[in-house]
Amino acid sequence: MCTSAASSAHPYAPGETPPAYRAPDPTGSTALTDDDAQPAPRSRKGGYPPFPEPLPVPVIDNHTHFDFREGPVGVTVHQALDAAEAAGVRGAVQVGTDLASSRFTAEAVEQDSRLLGAVALHPNDAPLLAEAGGLDDALAEIEQLAAGPRIRALGETGLDYFRTGEGGRGEQLRSFRSHIDIAKRLGKALQIHDREAHDDVVATLLADGPPERVVLHCFSGDAELARICNENGWYMSFAGTVTFKNAAGLREALLVADPALVLTETDAPFLTPEPHRGRPNASYLVPYTVRSMADVLDTGLDALCARLTANTEAVYGSWD
C-alpha cells in the first residue's frame, strides 16, 4: 500500500533552501537505501536554490531522478516530495536510466502515492550493454519491471548522438525499438530521450508505429519539431532549459506547441531553471519553469497549471 507524507507539517519559506536540502544526511543516504543511491554524472556548484513562491494550482513533475546523489546532500523520496508538494508540485514521475535506477523506481513508487514511475535503459547505455553481451537480458528485466501497476511509462529511452558515436548507434536503435515494442504491448506511455537525433527519432516512431502516448522528455527541438509533435499527438515536456537566455528557439517551439500536448519537468538534479542555472535541481523548483512558461505564452498562471496537470494525467493516469 502506498502512503503519502503530509507536507503541511514541514513549512518552507520562499527564499530559503528547504532544510532537507541544506545539511548533509549523516547516513549518506539520498533516498531508499545507500545501496540504491548513485552519484550524479556531473556535480553542480552553489548548493540547492531557494524555495520559490508556490504555484497557485498544483502541477506534476513528469521526469525526475530521485536516486541521483548531488554531493553530500542526502534527501529521501518523502522529503523531496514534501518540499515539492509545498511548492505546488503535487506529484512526480521517477525515471529509470539503467537496471539499478529502474529497480529503485519500482521500489520507490510503492512507498509514496505521490510518485509514479518509468523504467528503461538510457540510449547511451545500450551499446555498452550490447558489447558486454547483456543487452537482451537487460531488456527482459525492464519489461518485467514495466509490468508493475505504478510503472506507467517506458523511459527514458531513445537516441543520443551527442555522447554515442556512429559505431554504437545500431545498438541504440535496437534498444529504442525494443522499448517501443514493450510500451505498446503493455499499454504504457513512452518517454523519449532525444539528443541531436530529432530526424531519426521521428523516423523510428513513424516506421515502428508508436504507442498511444509519447512524450519527448526535455523537449529540445525547434518550432518545426513542435509542429510534427502536434500532427502526431506527441507530448512535449519542457524543462528548465526553456528559461535559459540562449533558448529563444525553444521558447518559439513552446509558442507553436498545441497547449493540450505540453508538460513540464525538472530532469533533476540537472537543468536547473534560471535564475539558478548551474546549481542542482529538484522538484520543488518547478515553479520557476512554469512561471517562465506562462510569461512566454502570455497566459494566466492558474490556467496554465491546470492545463499542465490535466495533460500529465492524460499521459500517465491517476496518481491515486
Image (cartoon, helix red, strand yellow):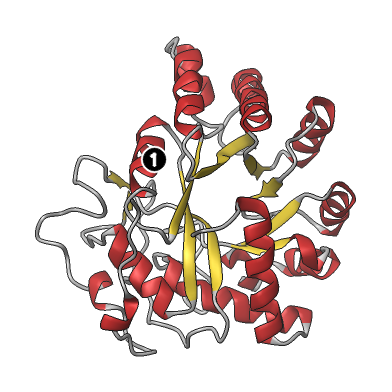
Q: Residue at left 53%, top 78%?
A: 287
User: Which residue type does callout 1 highlight?
Assistant: Ala
Residue lying furthest top = 133
Residue 181 percent across, percent down from the top left: 67, 25
Q: How many marks?
A: 1
Is 237 displayed left or right of 254 in the figure? Answer: left
Q: Is residue 116 above or below residue 187?
A: below
* Depicted 289 relative to depicted 191: above or below: below
What residue is drawn where x is 51% and y is 59%?
Answer: 319
Q: How packed is label 1: few (under 14 Cα within 10 Å), some, or many (20 or more)?
A: many
Relative horizontal placement of residue 16, taking residue 247 as reference (left or right):
left
Vertical side of 235 occupied by 134: above or below: above
User: Where residue 113 sits: x, y (%)?
Assistant: 40, 58
Residue 10 seen in render: no
Please tell me in which quadrant of the rendered image residue 204 appears: top right
Residue shown at the point (39%, 82%) measured from the top left:
51
Residue 102 in which image quadrant: top left
Query: Residue lying furthest front in this view?
Result: 1
Compare residues 214 and 252 and report the one nearer the observer. 214
Image position of 76 (left or right of 113): left
- Front one among 17 and 111: 111
Q: Which residue is mark 1?
A: 106
Q: Nearer the viewer, residue 74 or 9?
A: 9
Numbered disc 1: secondary structure: helix
